[in-house]
Image (cartoon, grey):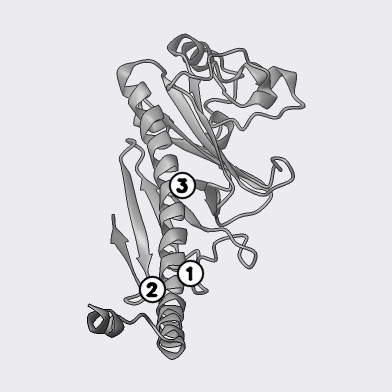
Amino acid sequence: MRVQDEKIKGFNVLELIIVIAIIGVLSAVAYPNFSDWRKDRETRNSVVKIKSLIEGINAQVQRGQYAFVQVDVEEGRLINEDDGLIVTSKGMKPKTLATLLNNGESGWWVTPNERCNIVDEADEADEAYWDEDPDPDRNQIIDLDKIEVRQIVLDNVATTWRDEIGAVCFGKNDQWYSGNGELVSSSGDDVIVDSYLFICNRSNTRSQCDIDNVTGEPTTEHDHLYVIEWSRFGNIKLEKWNKRDAEWIEQ
């Protein structure tokens, strides 16, 4: 038994050092991949939340809960002094819309951006434009647990603008499709509603997504870049930028 015990050995110091070195090398190789995967997962989760909010408010239009709705995306309004995107859905009841349609002075029939009203907090008259607005700064008393209108704050993603707000509006009648702020473009005398929202990972070195306005492709290298696209009928599509093949891939 004594001879058998002497044959049982543990690691010596040299072997232990080699094992530790191998573990260190493997960790150094694996960590960047894990970190990149984690950032992409966090970015995608935020993008899916925005997509779900747009789909949810459009579903309420189809159900007749609202006749006209808005999704606005605000960047730069500080939340606890941290930058982030604030995405809010708002709803207008059929009765309110009917009043606007019958009011020749409401601005509804003038331009699409007048129709897709971005509420000015300093203008008390604008406070009543949307029947249900979950933004706490609007001081509306509504049930914030309702799924019809929502507001989400995302501090890990950015879009193509800073310190501004963009809005897109949908209605039961697709002719009411409209936009305002950073989600409209001008072409001569015409106002064109943008049908997409670019979302990328926010970091210490990136505070907005760099996108070519003509090609819709990134002008700088993005590791985690997505785009949410919609139609005037409320159909939503999600794509991710594949930088290796330089193309958008539908998710």
- Determine the CA span between mark 1 and mark 3: 16 Å
Mark 1 touches mark 2? (CB < 8 Å): yes
How far across and down, in percent of the image, does residue 180 sit? 56, 40
For the residue marked with disc 1, what is the amino acid?
A: His
Q: Earlier in the sequence, mark 1 or mark 3?
A: 3
User: Label 3: how many residues lie within 10 Å, few (<14), some (14-19) or many (20+)?
Assistant: many
Residue sitting at 54 percent across and 62 percent down? 209
Whether 18 is drawn above or below 144: the answer is below
Residue sitting at 46 percent across and 47 percent down? 46
Q: Earlier in the sequence, mark 2 or mark 3?
A: 3
The image quadrant where one finds the N terminus is: bottom left
Q: Which mark is residue 222?
A: 1
- Left or right placement of residue 60 versus residue 149 in this view: left
How far across and down, in percent of the image, does residue 164 sit? 66, 47
| Tag 2 residue | 243
For the residue marked with disc 3, what is the amino acid?
A: Ser
How far across and down, in percent of the image, does residue 208 sit? 59, 60
Q: Secondary structure at mark 1?
A: loop
For the residue marked with disc 2, what is the amino acid?
A: Lys
Q: Secondary structure at mark 3?
A: helix
Whether 163 is drawn above or below 4: the answer is above
How far across and down, in percent of the image, does residue 55 sit? 36, 34
Residue sitting at 42 percent across and 48 percent down? 45
Q: Earlier in the sequence, mark 1 or mark 2?
A: 1
**Viewer can see residue 238:** yes
Mark 2 touches mark 3? (CB < 8 Å): no
| Tag 3 residue | 46
